[in-house]
Amino acid sequence: MRASTQQTYRPTKFRRTSYLVKRLENAVREMLEVALADRDVTLAQYTLLSMFSDVDGMSSADAARRCGVSKQASNEIINVLEAKRLISRTEDRENRRILRIKLTTAGRRLLAACDTAADRSEREFFSKLSATQVSALREAIEILIA
């Protein structure tokens, strides 16, 4: 009797919205990692490629701030992307210590393939929700992170 009670008991902290958001984040991360695995790109690399596509000429320091990671962690990923010839870095015209990052043609091609895979996976992942529910979820998230 006691064992079955322990299995069904769910402490209040596991009902917290923040806990559910963290579980959702983990599920989305796993879904995207699986989607990207065939393209030999990590989720962190895909995230940076997407950012560099949105903001042409971003610095590595800006990338680190936007991702919420250290400059060192960001630079390690950027070095891999550069070694794969997916990005290029050029000196800033006004401050030569700043390197501006741009996607290469290969980087744009890979990003497009990754976006297609991510779109497909997202459609499947969120298929349990109606279009109205997905829209409401997006709206709520945008309000909370603004």
Image: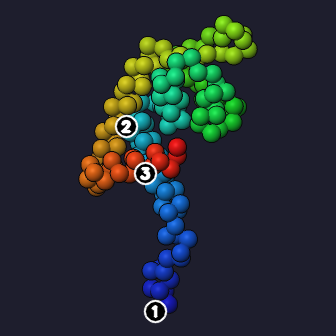
- Give left or right: position of 100 versus 97: left
Disc 3: which residue: 140
- Name the residue at 33% across, 31% down: 116
Question: In x, y percent, where is residue 68?
Answer: 62, 39
At 48% from the left and 31% from the top, the residue drawn is 46
**Circle 3 — which element?**
helix
Mark 1 or mark 2, earlier in chain: 1
- Residue, disc 2: 118
Q: Callout 2: helix, strand or loop?
A: helix
Q: Left or right of 65: which side holds 124? A: left
Residue 7 vs 115, above or below: the answer is below
Instruction: Specify the label residue 1 is tagged with.
Output: 1
Q: Give percent across and percent down for residue 8.
A: 45, 80
- The amino acid marked with disc number 3 is Ala
* Tag nearer the camera, 3 or 1: 3
**Amino acid of disc 1:** Met
Precedes in sequence: disc 3 or disc 1? 1
Can I make out residue 121 in this image?
yes
